[in-house]
Amino acid sequence: MATTIAGPVRLPDGTLPTHGRVIFEARQPIVDETLVLRGPVVAPISGAGAIDVDLEADAEGTPYAVTVEYWSPVQNRLISQTLPDVVPTGTGTGTLADFAAVPVPVAAPREIRRKRGDTITLPALYVDRFGRPISLTGVSVAAALRGVDGITRGLTIGIISAADGTFEIAMAAAASAALPLGPHALDVKFTVGTVVVRTLTATIHIDQEVTP
């Protein structure tokens, strides 16, 4: 089954390269009764900065690494740049952005530090195992902190966009003023009907405030 990726190729700075190609490489072999796809799929970039290519995928989704190679008249050389993975599902048509996964920065911190008495706000995104945003419609979200004193304290959840899977985890300044200093365990609980899933446990360090 194939998904058509068509439309503009937009670089992170917003520009559209007009001379080059986009290389798609499946991160795992695609195997069915008649096909074993291992090599890359190359899509030339048109003079309008667009591509049109079919990518084989299974219904659950197949992640592809994406690299764009283009000629830079400013630097007078060929440039190779990595874009976010795309995860086609074997049907449909869309742009690179429509099928893009959310890249997790390699340097993303595993621990968070906040001052006692500060308003705590943590932006969050609900994604599947391929990094694709999932709708929060029909999903109940909850989160809590467990401090060094062994007490579990609830956090506030604010849905920013249910369709886009974006939400915010928060605690008011008055509530955080009562937190004990030190590390606090944090996880997020998602409930759909009778199915309950929790995230891995993160750590928030609550530090001593200086300015009263």
Image (tube, rainbow, N blue to C red):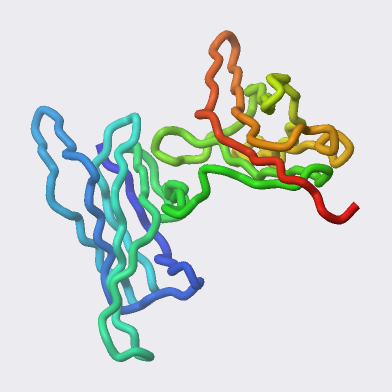
Give the answer, above or below, for where 193 lies relative to 12: above
- Depth check, front residue: 54 or 151: 151
Give the answer, above or below, for where 76 lies relative to 96: below
Q: Quadrant of the N terminus?
A: top left
Q: Residue at x 30, y 39 (%)?
A: 62
| 89 left or right of 108 in image | left
| 114 left or right of 119 in image | left
Give the answer, above or below, for where 74 lies relative to 109: below
- Depth check, front residue: 124 or 203: 203
Task: Tell me the quarter of the picture where residue 31 sits.
Answer: top left
Q: Residue at x 58, y 33 (%)?
A: 135
Residue 57: where, in percent of width, then height?
27, 38
Q: Residue at x 53, y 20 (%)?
A: 197
Residue 120: where, in percent of width, then height?
75, 43
- Depth check, front residue: 152 or 54: 152
Q: Residue at x 91, y 52 (%)?
A: 212
Residue 154: where, in percent of width, then height?
75, 24
Residue 27: where, in percent of width, then height?
24, 44
Task: Tell me the quarter of the picture where residue 71 sits.
Answer: bottom left
| 67 left or right of 174 in image | left
